[in-house]
């Protein structure tokens, strides 16, 4: 019995010496880390080796909204060319009815956003040349936004914040014979205060403006009536000042046409490891207050590039491999953007072969007015920086 107890004691001592027993080819303590796990926190100020910003990813004619603005910093009017209105319809299989007298004309729009703190908004509707030029500018359209071309002025109820609204506009809106059934309208915002209004354009799943003509047929079929519903063939808006490319050294995001920024990073190998990254924060400094609707917020996201084709680079589509931060209209100062998922992605087998290139953009593009600009690497100490917390490498085995 004494020998048996001695054997048990020896066994317990062996277990206490190493709690983890592994199968071959090795075992603890040979595979146990030496000492304690250590964290390192570092600030990389020169990791941004190149950056640029380009405008034009979503064009005005592709945006989900039409904008009318009375801001001192931005003037804008809407331009809409509706589809050709037919003048003949068929009440039944045998009769042909011709459009006779026009009873009324109704314009419908879907309000996307407005500042509800601004009251007494009106929409001034003007007649534009039927064959509206899609290359029109704010300056080239101004001669038509004058009294001789005014069709009607309609009031937007103060209680309406969003949704479909309809306006009966002047019945004098007739289709001249020379216009081949085509009507083009310009819409300007009239407001006692500076403000912005957007309506759906028909792009990106939004509801477009609609022009409805309510008419009845000529005698002897004048008891028959019909509503012609005409969606737009062209819908866009023009601005002053016209949008330009972002200035050199500034990382501009958002707006219309939409801008994106790219950053190429040079990182120590020790911080590009999917197992080691604890936290990675991209530190950015705004160069001006963020734009957008008053009291509104929007999202800025960072995505890694899979294939580098310049401004047409292919982005990694998985939202889990990205970073995001909310920006408030008027916000200025430093912004912190978490990009740890991107660094962890670069440490994987798939991500290791991709360029160390990220794209910054607003979300969703072409559907919001939000815009922000950050200082680029040329700004020196005010340029982008990266704060990384990671686990220091450690060795296995006996000390």
Image: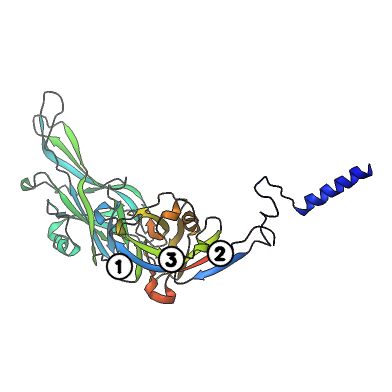
Labels 2 & 3 near each other (Cβ < 8 A): no
Q: Residue furthest left?
A: 178
Q: Residue furthest top?
A: 94
Mark 1 surroundings: few (<14), some (14-19) or many (≥20) residues within 10 A: some
Observer-nearest residue: 383 or 98? Answer: 383
Percent x, y of residue 133: 14, 55
In front: label 2 or label 3: 3
Q: Quarter-wise, where is residue 395 in the image? A: bottom right
**The C terminus is located in which quarter?**
bottom right
Observer-nearest residue: 124 or 172? Answer: 124
Q: How is the image coloured?
A: rainbow
**The N terminus is located in which quarter?**
top right
- Any mark on residue 266, and which? 3
Left or right: 207 with respect to 2?
A: left
Percent x, y of residue 16: 79, 52
Cα–Cα gap, marks 2 and 1: 33 Å
Instruction: Residue at 41% x, 76% y: name it.
Output: 380
Instruction: Residue at 31% x, 59% y: name it.
Output: 310
Percent x, y of residue 125: 20, 55
Instruction: Residue at 78% x, 49% y: name it.
Output: 15
* Vertical order, 321 against 242 (above or below): above
Left or right: 13 with respect to 53?
A: right
Q: Name the residue that disc number 1 marks.
A: 246
Q: Name the residue that disc number 2 marks.
A: 389
């Amino acid at each position: 019995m004494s020998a048996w107890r001695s054997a048990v004691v020896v066994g317990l001592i062996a277990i206490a010496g190493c709690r983890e027993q592994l199968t071959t080819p090795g075992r603890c303590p040979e595979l146990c880390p030496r000492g304690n796990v250590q964290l390192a926190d570092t600030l990389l100020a020169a990791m941004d080796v190149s950056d640029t910003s380009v405008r034009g990813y979503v064009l005005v004619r592709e945006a989900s909204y039409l904008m009318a603005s009375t801001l001192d910093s931005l003037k804008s009017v809407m331009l809409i060319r509706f589809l050709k209105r037919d003048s003949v319809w068929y009440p039944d299989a045998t009769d042909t009815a011709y459009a006779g007298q026009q009873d009324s004309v109704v314009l419908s729009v879907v309000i996307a956003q407005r500042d509800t703190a601004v009251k007494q908004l009106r929409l001034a509707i003007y007649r534009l040349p039927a064959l509206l030029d899609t290359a029109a500018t704010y300056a080239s359209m101004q001669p038509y936004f004058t009294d001789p071309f005014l069709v009607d002025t309609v009031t937007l109820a103060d209680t309406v914040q969003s949704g479909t609204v309809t306006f009966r506009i002047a019945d004098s809106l007739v289709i001249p014979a020379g216009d081949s059934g085509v009507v083009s309208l310009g819409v300007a915002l009239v407001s006692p205060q500076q403000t912005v209004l957007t309506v759906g354009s028909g792009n990106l799943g939004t509801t477009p403006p609609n022009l409805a003509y309510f008419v009845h047929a000529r005698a002897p079929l004048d008891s028959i009536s019909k509503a012609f519903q005409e969606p737009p063939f062209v819908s866009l808006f023009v601005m002053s000042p016209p949008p330009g490319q972002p200035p050199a050294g500034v990382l501009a995001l958002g707006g219309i046409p939409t801008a994106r920024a790219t950053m190429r990073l040079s990182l120590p190998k020790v911080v590009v490891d999917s197992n080691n990254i604890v936290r990675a924060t991209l530190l950015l400094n705004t160069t001006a207050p963020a734009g957008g609707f008053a009291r509104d917020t929007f999202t800025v996201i960072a995505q890694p590039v899979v294939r580098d084709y310049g401004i047409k680079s292919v982005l990694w589509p998985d939202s889990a491999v990205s970073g995001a931060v909310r920006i408030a209209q008027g916000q200025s100062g430093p912004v912190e953007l978490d990009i740890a998922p991107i660094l962890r992605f670069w440490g994987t087998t798939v991500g290791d072969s991709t360029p160390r290139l990220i794209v910054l953009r607003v979300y969703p593009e072409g559907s919001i007015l939000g815009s922000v600009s950050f200082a680029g690497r040329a700004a020196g100490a005010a340029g982008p920086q990266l704060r990384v917390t990671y686990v220091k490498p450690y060795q296995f085995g006996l000390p």
